[in-house]
Image: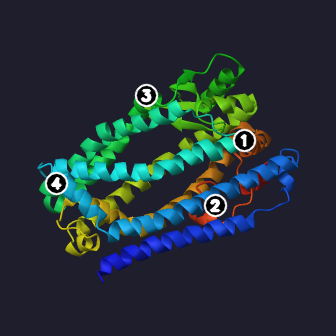
Amino acid sequence: MNSYLIFILCVLAFGYLLDLTISLLTLRSLQPILPEEFSGIYDADKYERSQEYTRVNLRFSLLQDTLMLPLTIAFIMLGGFNLLDQWARSFGFSTIPAGLIFTGLLLLLSGLVHLPFSIYSTFVIENRFGLNRTTVKTFVFDILKIIVLVVLLGGPILALILWFFEQGGDLAWLYCWLLVVGFTIIMQFLAPVVIMPLFNRFTPLADGELKQAITEYARKQNFALQGIYTMDGSKRSNRLNAFFTGFGRFRRIVFFDTLVEKLSVDELVVILAHEMGHFKKKHILKMMASSILQTGLMFYILSLFIRNPGLFEAFGMEHLSIYAGLVFFGVLYSPISTLLSVVGNVFSRKYEYQADGYAVSTTGKGRDLIAALKKLCLANLSNLTPHPLQVFLQYSHPPVLRRIEAIKAIL
């Protein structure tokens, strides 16, 4: 049997077994007794509801993985990629248009396979637990908007990547790296004002106590904001969230309208301070630099495998092509991607502690930050007792009890 095929099957099996192990350990780690720290925040029914939400989602995820694994293996073994390639070539176009068609067909097929799971998750599970506010119309239009963006933005980028690998010689990987980095940086400026408003309505925060408190805090920290906005997060969900977006004069703070409804002014200010801490501590730049380096590594390794005959044989392909090599390399690269993700999460959790520390030291509102974290957990039905292995491998934020413990240590 082809050695690449053996490796690919092992990667798929290992990924499934790892997810299975994490899910089973997480289910076993659910504690029936409410942690003392959350006494008075949850009652018995609410706590059981949050645990049941975790159980339902984990079991649904396991079901999805269990169904997708044999489907993926069957698609590879039965020559599904080759059939799509033959269809893409049947139009008689040159390699780049054929590559766009091949990739588009693959994305369409993947989207159709995952669509029932997405529908069930949104309209059954999220509805059951009172988190979903997405209408069928919003759901459908979101999909259509994503398709348009993929075509208008992803299509030209993919075409340029294919062209660079066809014409760029040994330095093609470098040209692709610079292209993707440039596109990513540009999108940091354009996304807040062009892309995100396609999906949500952003309204400048009305004058009042909250805006005054935020403006005053930002002024004291010498932190320029292009604007303070609320976003109609309630259009899709009852979850609470806030985030910074953009750079320079495009930088803005965004609060979900659900967050503004649930949190006090002091709690919102300290949440803002936490997000500001990421900027002040240069976490955003560090994570972006790391992502840029990882992208460069990926393209360099890709250049070593993109025309490998053994790789194409593993996927049952009759023809070698750069566009198919891009797809196949993604499977080979997944172990490296997973490892880098784990390392990235280690730093991300460290940065969250630092941002909490910044928020507490600059506002003096540590108790309010703790109260805000508790309200976020309650509203989002968060798992208060995740298994350490799940935290290590998958969590970009520390478990809330650890964060609260760290905040109390500096009060």
- Picture disc at residue 59: 2
Q: CA distance from mark 3 to mark 1?
A: 28 Å
Q: In which quarter of the view is residue 376 placed?
A: top right
Along the viewing direction, whichever of 59 and 372 lies nearer the viewer = 59
Are the residues flagged by discs 3 and 1 in contact, CB closer than 8 Å?
Answer: no
| Mark 3 crowd level (few <14, some 14–19, many ≥20, 10 Å Cα) | some
- Spot occupied by residue 396 in the image (x, y as percentages of width and height): 58, 55
Reading the image, the residue beneath label 1 is 379
Type of the residue with mark 1: Ala
Label 3 or label 1, whichever comes before in sequence order: 3
Q: Mark 4: which secondary structure?
A: helix
Q: Nearer the viewer, residue 367 or 362?
A: 367
> In the rendered image, which quarter is residue 271 located in?
top right
Q: Amino acid at mark 3?
A: Val
What residue lies at 64% left-to-right and 35% top-to-bottom?
272
Q: Which mark is residue 89?
A: 4
